Image (tube, rainbow, N blue to C red):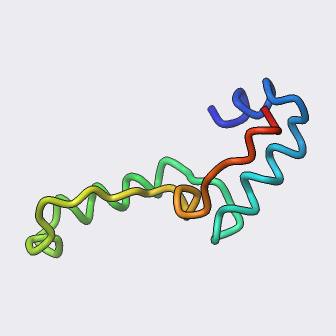
Amino acid sequence: MADAAFDIAKNPEATRQDAMARHVGNRFGEPADIAKAVAWLASDDSEFATGQMYVIDGGLTAASPLNPSLF
């Protein structure tokens, strides 16, 4: 899905590199990353976590704003 977004950028490779640089883990997310969070939330280990919003994006949101000149 991210590949389609990069493909419409003015410079797809620069846009991909910009996005990758914002991810602390130096990789894009996989469905398993979300599945692990869901499994934790469904487990007893998360019983004290209430009323929270969890952003699972590899640090992308924390590194925003995006570079609008790439689009």
Q: Image point 71% across, 27% down: which residue?
A: 4
- On screen, residue 34 versus residue 63, left or right, reads left
How many callouts does the rendering have?
0
The location of residue 18, given as percent across then percent down, is 79, 53
The location of residue 15, given as percent across then percent down, is 81, 43
Q: Quadrant of the N terminus?
A: top right
Q: Quadrant of the C terminus?
A: top right
| Residue in the foreground of this view, choosing between 19 and 44 | 19
Q: Image point 16% across, 66% down: which residue?
A: 43
Q: Quarter of the image holding residue 11?
A: top right
Q: Quarter of the image holding residue 69?
A: top right
Q: Image point 53% across, 56% down: which residue?
A: 61
- On screen, residue 56 versus residue 39, left or right, reads right
- On screen, residue 38 versus residue 19, left or right, reads left
The location of residue 66, given as percent across then percent down, is 67, 48
Q: Image point 88% across, 46% down: which residue?
A: 14
Q: Is residue 65 above or below residue 49?
A: above
- On screen, residue 65 versus residue 51, left or right, reads right
The location of residue 54, given as percent across then percent down, is 32, 59
| Residue in the foreground of this view, choosing between 64 and 33 | 64
